[in-house]
Image: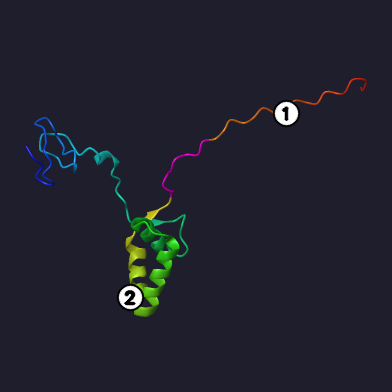
């Protein structure tokens, strides 16, 4: 049996192609389906300068927010469409108030307070 996508030779018990990951139709889901995260186009209220539209598009397209702001400004100034598009995106994009949780930093336990210094011999 061969994979219909890449032509790799498959065993009769294989549920997925070892080369390209295509489902062979023998049950189960894709091996990395649990790791796929859905990106949402939202306006992050904690990263905004004006309305958060550029920050939302920057996060969605995975580019730097400053680059997105410069590009949007250039489109707005040179074509005029950017102003209208920004206003429409401001209305249509949902707000996101809480930041997306990332891996929590590992905190070290507090160290013990320093021991009091003992007086030298002969001093009291």
**Residue at which label 2 appears:** 81
Residue 41: give x, y in percent of width and height: 33, 56
Q: Which one is nearer the viewer's eye here, 40 or 120? A: 120
Residue drawn where x is 46% and y is 65% of the image: 50
Please check the rendered image and state whether residue 14 is part of the magenta-colored stretch, yes or no: no
Q: Which one is nearer the viewer's eye here, 80 or 78? A: 78
Q: Earlier in the sequence, mark 2 or mark 1?
A: 2
Residue 12: give x, y in percent of width and height: 8, 31
Q: Secondary structure at mark 2?
A: helix
Q: Which one is nearer the viewer's eye here, 23 or 46? A: 23
Q: Is 9 drawn above or below residue 115 in the view shown?
A: below
Quadrant of the frame with the C terminus: top right
Please check the rendered image and state whether residue 101 is part of the magenta-colored stretch, yes or no: yes
Any part of residue 74 in sight: yes
The quarter of the displayed image where residue 60 is located: bottom left
Q: Secondary structure at mark 1?
A: loop
The quarter of the displayed image where residue 17 is located: top left
How many numbered badges does the structure rendering display? 2
Dot 1, how many residues are within 10 Å of its Cα: few (below 14), some (14-19), or many (20+)? few
Quadrant of the frame with the N terminus: top left
Bounds of the magenta span? 98-106
Residue drawn where x is 57% and y is 33% of the image: 108
**Residue at which label 1 appears:** 114
The quarter of the displayed image where residue 113 is located: top right
Horizontal side, residue 108 vs residue 66: left or right: right
């Amino acid at each position: 049996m061969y994979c219909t996508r890449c032509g790799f030779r498959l065993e009769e018990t294989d549920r997925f192609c070892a080369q390209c990951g295509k489902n062979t139709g023998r049950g189960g889901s894709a091996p990395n389906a649990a790791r796929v995260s859905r990106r949402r186009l939202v306006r992050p209220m904690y990263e905004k300068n004006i309305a958060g539209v550029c920050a939302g598009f920057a996060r969605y397209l995975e580019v730097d927010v400053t680059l997105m702001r410069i590009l949007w400004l250039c489109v707005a100034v040179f074509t005029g469409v950017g102003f209208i598009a920004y206003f429409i995106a401001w209305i249509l994009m949902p707000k996101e108030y809480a930041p997306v949780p990332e891996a929590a930093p590992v905190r070290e336990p507090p160290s013990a307070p320093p021991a009091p210094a003992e007086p030298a011999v002969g001093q009291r």
